[in-house]
Every structure is written in structure tokens, then in C-alpha cells.
Image (cartoon, grey):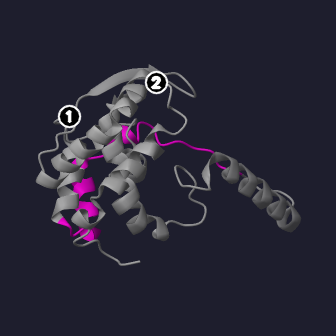
């Protein structure tokens, strides 16, 4: 994989790729009112998104905020479904191919064919290995307090721009990141936020 991303925006901007992003975004969530309404006119919505992205007139919509309490109290900001399709298209076509090959094999969150269950299995295997070698071992469980809430978006954009040299992709990243007009804190509910962390 190339070390930088150049001139890919319009190559990946196809009806087929946007439709694929829609189908992946609705997976396991297809019975919500918002997705059912989108499905009724999905071809029109996908063409609308295609035109908006092609002309660079796309504007990310506002978020709906709600709170979850498991495993702890968190504020989640949810984008409209049409914006989630764009997030999925951005991540799957540009961010993942560029950054996933650089992740260590023990990176699990939000990565296809890894996830929580594989993390548990790998941890169990590592514990058995450590038990055989050292008999006693320690596990450190930790969480970075308010991690998403403290990410500086300007610093994030600078880090991303080191590898993403495609100005059109950077335009879309900035459109998604700065829709709320704040420079600190990324939205927990965005698919792109999972990769940007």
C-alpha cells in the first residue's frame, strides 16, 4: 500500500461505492424509521450524495445527542443517516486502506474480523502462554478518561494531512470534523471517529 494518498477522491466517487457504503451502514439497523425511509428512495439519495460530493457542495448535517450508561455515562452524538453513509464511504475507501496496514495485530476495535470476541480469545491465549512461562503474571486494565472529548481537531487534521495529500479527501474530512464549529472533541457516534482516534 502507498505511504500517502493522492488523487483518489474522484476515482472512488462512484454510485457503486456509495451504494455499498449505504448497504454496510444499514447492516443490522435496517428496521429504524430513518433507514426505511432512505431505502424507499435509495437510488435518488445515492445520486444526490454523488452530485453533492462531486460538486463539493456536500454539507454534513447536525447531530442528535443522547446519553448511554453502559459501561459508564457517555454522551453520544449521532449524525443523520445520509451523513453516516458519507462517513462510511470516506473511511472504507480512504482511511482504512491507508492506516489499517500500519496497525499492530493486537488492534481490535472497529476492525473487520477482529473485534471484542477475537480480543478475548487472543487475551486468553496470551494468559495461557504467560502462565506456562512465568507462572505469575499481571494484566493492566485501563481507560483514558474523556479521550474522544479531548482530541484537538486541528492537531488531528495536521496528522492526517501528513499521509493524505488528496485535497478533496481532506476537504471532506474537515467538513465532517468541523460541522459543530468546535476545535476540541470528536463525536463518539461517528464511524470516522472510531478510525480517527
**What residue lies at 34% left-to-right and 23% top-to-bottom?**
65
Q: Position of residue 129 (x, y in %)?
A: 82, 64
The residue at 41%/42% (across/down) is 147
Residue 191 % position (x, y) = 40, 44
Residue in the foreground of this view, choosing between 108 and 145: 108
Asked whether disc 2 touches disc 1, contact meaning CB atoms under 8 Å apart, the reply is no
Left or right of residue 132: residue 169: left
40 on left or right of 14: right
Q: Is residue 155 magenta?
A: yes
Instruction: Give the camera-side residue of 173 and 14.
Output: 14
Q: Determine whether 6 is above or below 137 in the image.
A: below
Labels 2, 1: front one:
2
Residue 109 visible, this orientation: yes
Q: Which residue is mark 1?
A: 180
Q: Disc 2 to disc 1, how far (Cα)? A: 25 Å
Instruction: Return the x and y of residue 105 as percentages of the image width and height.
Output: 59, 66
Q: Nearer the viewer, residue 131 or 170?
A: 170
Snapshot quadrant of residue 142: top right
Q: Which residue is mark 2?
A: 32
Secondary structure type for disc 2? loop
Q: Is residue 133 magenta?
A: no
Give the x, y percent position of residue 52: 17, 46
The N terminus, quarter of image: bottom left
Number of residues whose C-alpha sits closer than 10 Å to that of mark 2, classed few (under 14), some (14–19) or many (20 or more): few
Disc number for residue 31: none
Find the magenta span and give its range.
139-166
161 up-or-down from 187: above or below: below
Q: Residues within 10 Å of mark 1 (few under 14, many from 20)?
A: some
Amino acid at each position: 500500500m502507498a505511504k500517502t494518498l493522492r488523487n483518489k477522491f474522484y476515482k472512488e466517487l462512484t454510485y457503486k461505492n456509495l451504494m455499498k457504503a449505504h448497504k454496510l451502514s444499514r447492516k443490522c439497523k435496517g428496521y429504524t424509521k430513518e433507514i426505511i425511509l432512505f431505502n424507499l428512495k435509495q437510488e435518488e439519495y445515492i445520486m444526490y450524495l454523488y452530485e453533492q460530493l462531486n460538486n463539493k457542495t456536500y454539507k454534513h448535517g447536525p447531530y442528535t445527542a443522547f446519553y448511554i450508561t453502559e459501561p459508564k455515562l457517555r454522551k453520544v452524538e449521532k449524525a443523520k443517516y445520509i451523513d453516516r453513509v458519507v462517513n462510511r464511504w470516506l473511511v472504507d475507501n480512504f482511511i482504512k486502506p491507508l492506516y489499517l496496514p500500519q496497525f499492530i495485530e493486537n488492534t481490535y476495535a472497529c476492525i473487520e474480523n477482529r473485534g471484542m470476541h477475537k480480543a478475548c480469545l487472543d487475551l486468553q491465549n496470551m494468559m495461557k502462554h504467560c502462565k506456562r512461562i512465568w507462572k505469575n503474571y499481571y494484566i493492566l486494565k485501563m481507560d483514558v478518561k474523556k479521550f474522544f472529548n479531548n482530541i484537538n481537531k486541528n492537531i488531528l487534521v495536521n496528522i492526517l494531512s501528513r499521509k493524505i495529500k488528496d485535497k478533496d479527501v481532506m476537504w471532506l474530512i474537515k467538513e465532517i470534523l468541523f460541522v459543530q464549529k468546535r476545535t476540541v472533541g470528536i463525536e463518539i457516534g461517528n464511524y470516522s471517529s472510531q478510525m480517527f482516534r
